[in-house]
Image: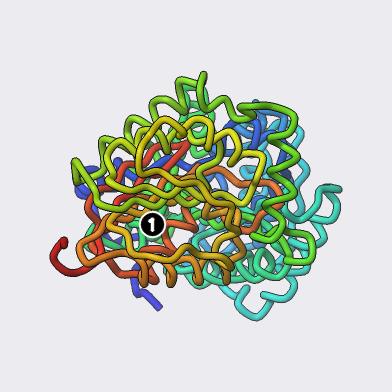
Amino acid sequence: MVSFTHHDAGTSERAWAASGVPALPELPLDAGELASAAFIVLAAHPDDESLGAGGLMARLHSLGAQVRVLLCTAGEASHPDSPSTTPEQLAEVRLREFDGALGGLVPGADWQYLGLPDGKIAGHRERIVAAIHEAAAATGQPPQRVVVVAPYRNDGHIDHDTAGTAAAEAAGSAGYGLLEYPVWYWLWASPEDQAWHTWLRLPLQPAEEQAKARAMAAHSSQVSALSDQPGDEVLLPPGFLKHFARPWETFAWQRPTVARSGGYAAADAEGLFDTVHSGSDDPWQYTTSWYEQRKRALTLAALPGRDYTAGLEIGCSIGTLSVELAKRCGNFLAVDASSAALAHAARRLAHLPGVQTRQLTVPQDWPEGEFDLIVVSEVGYYLAPGELEVLFDRVEAALLPGGTLALCHWRHPIEGWELDGDAVHAAARRQLRWADAGLYRERDFVLEILRAPGAPQ
């Protein structure tokens, strides 16, 4: 457990501003995805919700998303040595402040006070887990459309850690999404700490920043002194509040999971995508969408080699990227599970020498031979986690020393599938442990180049 008090100067906001935190990638959830989900916001004490997720809550309200709030304690122990206010009186004050702050973020919000003892909720984790499940069930949404917003589970305050751990337990058991917001972490941690490197930013609009600032100010018992007497000092001084005046909020994100009984895997791909392609020659507007054209250009520009001896593209679809890749390869093989998509790709590639197409359901099927370029674009999340592991085993065995693995994936949740783009790329880095030769990431997609160990042949 981290040892700190609110009297500590801690890490300054200037130090965090000079770190990589302002350049963290954006949370890959657009307005439609936020509006269609139900959110359970968990706060250990009044003001946690405003500090850590006030901007998010303001956005959710503006989008019409369903928001339910669970408050664990009244925060009655914030001033244990106060000569002017008893814990009972402070509890009443802080509950009023909470109601007022919440009313400014999510007017008419549905919130529930669990009545747990401030500073001692560690013994009530099961109650918190049960309350999260009850609130989630009351939304009427399936688990994969529920997101729990909770304190970061390693925030350093026992109540925050307990609430975060309970949220993670509930999310893991039911498949909810999970957004963890740090609060005290910004005080005691430093930019050298590694935890924040995997977090994501939610840039705030001016109106959301203003709503958050008003909500924070509504907790006057914490941002102002209770009196001028010793023991009634300000709990959240201006230096600390600077961490929450940023034009963004920061979250650790765990996307909802789909139970295997209701999710898809590689074996489902052929039928699903044959159906999609039978109704359109270009169902994803690969040939007309500027987004797709730009993403292809970035992918091609990111390849470190000008020319390759043998290239393999997994999941070529109708072959729009394949055409450009094939021009840079002496021999090129494009594979896809969908025979309907592959028929379009074969016609598009027919004029190029040294090019083959083949219907394969990867990773169960795999072509013979070795390659110095393998491209896995917009296909990794169509595999179950175990299948993805097998895929990277196959890639590792087939890629020549010094060869290039190009990964490019959409970062938003894929309905009916367990994985998303970020999970695919994280799995590749974790399993292969290859050198990263290039990384480009924006809200919608991530593009990454990995190099196999050894000198290129």
Is residue 221 visible in this depiction of the protein? no
Q: Where does the N terminus fall, quadrant-wise?
A: bottom left
**Viewer-nearest residue: 355 or 154:** 355
Give x and y (percent) for residue 94: 61, 50
Q: Residue at x 35, y 44 (%)?
A: 354
Q: Where is residue 181? Give x, y as percent.
A: 49, 53
**Eyeballing the image, is 419 above or below 395?**
above
Q: Is residue 18 left or right of residue 89?
A: left
Residue under label 1, please give it.
Answer: 198
* Viewer-nearest residue: 391 or 236: 391
User: Residue 383 appears in which quarter of the rendering?
Assistant: bottom right
Q: Quadrant of residue 382?
A: bottom right
User: What is the crowding at mark 1: few (fewer than 14 residues within 10 Å), some, or many (at least 20)?
Assistant: few
Q: Quadrant of the C terminus?
A: bottom left
Picture coordinates of residue 352, whole percent (x, y): 38, 34
Q: Nearer the viewer, residue 266 or 366?
A: 366
Q: Label 1, secondary structure: give it.
A: helix
Note whether 267 is above or below 414 in the view shown: below
Q: Is residue 248 visible?
A: yes
Q: Is residue 71 left or right of residue 342?
A: right
Q: Residue at x 19, y 46 (%)?
A: 305
Three-letter amino acid code of the residue under disc 1: Thr
